[in-house]
Amino acid sequence: MGGSTALQVARSGMRPILLDQGDLGQGASGVNAGTLSLQIKRVKLMPYALRGHHEWEAMGDTVGFRKTGGYTVAFTEREVELLHERQAQKAEAGAPITFVSDNALRAAEPNLSHKVLAASFCPEDGYANSSLTGQYYRARLRDNAIPYLEHSPVVDISQDQSGFALVTPQGSVRAKRVLLAAGAWLKPVAAMLGVDLPVQARINTVSVTERMPPLTSHVIGHATGLLTMKQKANGTVLVGGGWQGRGTPQDGRGEVMANSVVPNLALAQFALPQLSQARVLRSWTGFEANVPDFYPLAGALPGVENAYVLGCVRGGYTIGPYIGKLMGDYILEREPELPLFDPGRDFNEDTI
Ligand SMILES: Cc1cc2nc3c(=O)[nH]c(=O)nc-3n(C[C@H](O)[C@H](O)[C@H](O)COP(=O)(O)OP(=O)(O)OC[C@H]3O[C@@H](n4cnc5c(N)ncnc54)[C@H](O)[C@@H]3O)c2cc1C
């Protein structure tokens, strides 16, 4: 998200510099499941997700973008109800989601379990390859002569009349304005400016199988949101769904927990029985940030002039490149195309 904002402000002549504590795109943006599915986005974020999709489509092959279409399936009467309720709301909010007949599902995805009771379809759904995020943004920053410093953790920020000083072990950087786009590390970074943001981190798990013969050609999700699955062009199957590992962003990498990977894979196998033949090559975790109302932080940092914050976006891989541009417009003092999300709001009220 920081990379997207940097590109947007540079287009209007600002001279941004990016500081990252590690390699660019090695936070959540580089380890996520890469699902670009409108069916798993929050209803109120649908206009942002639709525009986010268009951003990824424009990036195309350089980020491994594939528009496969996606099915979300339900196995029980309760899940069917949930599917209808959730997807109907999303369709109303502008996503081209329809409910499909059993025959249509069988024709499109013959290997899916016969226990599927109902399914919805969205032709816009697809995926990109999150391990290419850093590479993509590094190249765009270079193309636009925007400097970036990797392995430069910001350990202190101070403000005086001429702006901010950001301290890293390699030296200090001065800036008139600062955008905090530190993902799951936002809380300690905002604390450097004396602001307490109610940011929490979730520790999501993703797994990948060995290469398999063609099993599925769409993004597959589950009505509860507890499964996302897609088979990549090389035959590997990527399985996610927000199952939790253990650890904190401050401790470095999170830990994969067998008691959450096993049910995640069991659900995947229930949906696609031939997965029982596949060996899992690797499971890993990444940190995703959120605030209590699960809406983004995107706007001015409360109480600190010329400081801004961007993060905590549910489905932030999909929406990130777009909301990053909106943030850029806000910093440029232009009216953003869609409203931002005030980081100074009351998080316990539904004020959005
Ligand atoms: C495992 C997993 C699976 C997910 N799957 C999906 C999905 O399928 N689809 C989807 O839409 N979304 C998904 N998400 C959510 C999505 O990945 C995130 O919402 C999004 O990538 C967040 O982007 P960001 O730029 O805010 O944060 P990050 O990508 O985490 O970037 C924050 C950056 O800040 C840097 N930083 C932190 N502290 C400092 C400091 N002190 N100094 C300098 N730099 C610092 C970090 O190094 C990092 O590069 C998933 C998340 C996870 C973790």
Image (cartoon, rainbow, N blue to C red):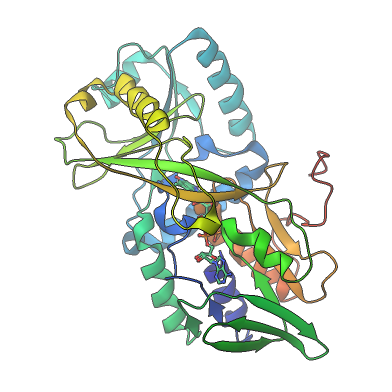
State the residue in front, 120 or 342.
342
Name the image quarter holding the C terminus. Answer: top right
- 132 to 115, vertically: above or below: below
Q: How many marks?
A: 0
* Residue 67 position in % (x across, y down): 37, 46
Residue plotted at (27% across, 36% down): 217
Farthest residue to the top: give it: 77
Q: Nearer the viewer, residue 203 or 93?
A: 203
Left/right placement of residue 224 relative to residue 158 reads left
To which quarter of the image does residue 105 belong?
Answer: top left
Q: In this rendering, would 174 be left or right of 206? A: right
Residue 297 placed where, x, y %? 70, 55
At x 74%, y 56%, the residue is 197
Q: Is residue 264 visible?
A: yes
Q: Position of residue 279 (x, y in %)?
A: 19, 34
Q: Is residue 109 above or below residue 335?
A: above
Q: Is residue 316 above or below residue 145?
A: above
Q: Residue at x 23, y 27 (%)?
A: 275
Can residue 318 be seen here? no
- Where is residue 204? Give x, y as percent: 47, 42
Say which quadrant the N terminus sits in. bottom right
In terms of depth relative to the viewer, which is nearer, 296 or 332? 296
